[in-house]
Image: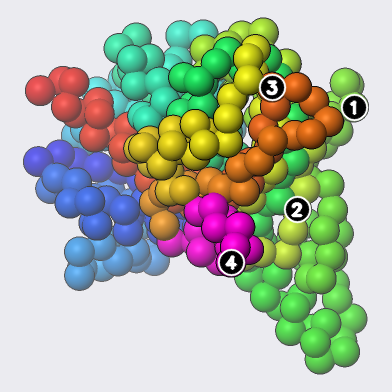
Amino acid sequence: MVTVAIVGATGAVGAELLAVLERREFPVERLVPMASARSVGTTVRFRGADHPVVEAKADAFAGVDVAFFSAGATRSRDLIPHARAAGALVVDNSSAFRMDPSVPLVVPEVNPDALAGHDGVVANPNCVAAILTVAVAPLTKLGHVERLVISTYQSASGAGARAMEDLLVQTADHLAGREVVPRVLRHPFAFNLFSHDSAVEGNGYNGEENKVVAELRKILGMADLPVSVTCMRVPILRAHTATVNIEFDRAVSVEAAREAIAAADGVQLVDDPEANHFPMPNEASGKDDVLVGRVRLDPSRANTLNLLVSGDQLLKGAALNAVQLAEALRAAAS
């Protein structure tokens, strides 16, 4: 039995971490939910009991065995050294250490061997990168991947609980004929879509797109993989969706791709052309597995397939992957 801290316990991912820990029967003896000072005095529910939230600060990690961080990169950079000094194993859901060469960036179904090099901190990938690598990894066994072209359709959950609430408010305002006023993201969310809200960087791509490219390469172990990504926000509460155009060094049949997806861990083949039934965010929401389907040849380019992917951003894209990493770390240490 272990003492578990969750930094960011009152946020959307924090709530999912609590639910996943309970559902997977992670051996929590003592729970230490942490958040900012303004949340002190509130409680979170875990295994039928209310647990008081304490302030996330440097001296709060005494006796903690496993610490999940989901409170942003700044808090991770500030507090993870203190958690490590107190002896905690850290699973960090922020971008703070993902591209640090000394920190493994891991999706257990894809690159579990990378955990062997950890020094007490393991990075949880960007939500899109986690979902995409689970979908793409089974296909890498069919041929060398030459190129990926990806478009993402990202839900409000990726911007946190406040963005999810704002989408509901905006939708109600729009349907009632009231003015729609964005309160969390800069553009109207309801009945709209827009380029991902991260800042556009020097190469013309926004921060989310650049993160996805870098993290896909690191997780898949393909440092020079050509990847082009366009990330969009869409008015969906949770579960991200993406189209994937994947080029190989040889011909790969639709049948072989479908078989590889169906046999892989962490994915579910949803591919029924007769019923026009393919991955959808409403069906991916609440599911551990990533849904993959609409597998078809690209007639415009040799050795290339198109896929449709949908996965729950709060589960495989965040909380579930984090708990799987903690399970793997404990198993390796035993």
Q: Which residue is mark 1?
A: 204
Residue identified by numbered label 3:
303
Give the residue displayed 19% in from the left and 41% down from the top: 3
- In x, y percent, where is residue 232? 77, 48
Q: Secondary structure at mark 2?
A: strand
Q: Quadrant of residue 45?
A: bottom left
Marks 2 and 1, the one that precedes in the sequence: 1
Q: Which residues are magenta?
A: 270-286
Report the side of 101 relative to 268 (left or right): right
Residue type for callout 2: Arg
Relative to residue 18, is residue 50 depicted above or below? below
Nearest to the eye among marks 1 and 3: give it. Answer: 3
Q: Secondary structure at mark 3?
A: loop
Q: Amino acid at mark 4?
A: Ala
State the separation of the CA atoms marked 2 and 1.
Answer: 17 Å
Say whether disc 1 or disc 4 marks the residue closer to the N-terminus. Answer: 1
Mark closer to the observer (1, 4): 4
Is disc 2 in contact with disc 4, using a CB cutoff of under 8 Å? no
10 Å neighbourhood of mark 1: few (<14), some, or many (≥20)? few
**Disc ID at residue 275:** 4
1 or 3: tag closer to the N-terminus = 1
Q: Tell me the mark number nearer the camera, choosing from 2 and 4.
A: 4
The residues bearing labels 2 and 3 have C-alpha atoms spaced at a distance of 30 Å
Q: Which residue is mark 2?
A: 233
Name the main secondary structure of what is drawn in magenta: loop
The span from disc 4 to disc 3 (Cα, nearest Å) is 27 Å
Q: Position of residue 21 (x, y in %)?
A: 27, 51
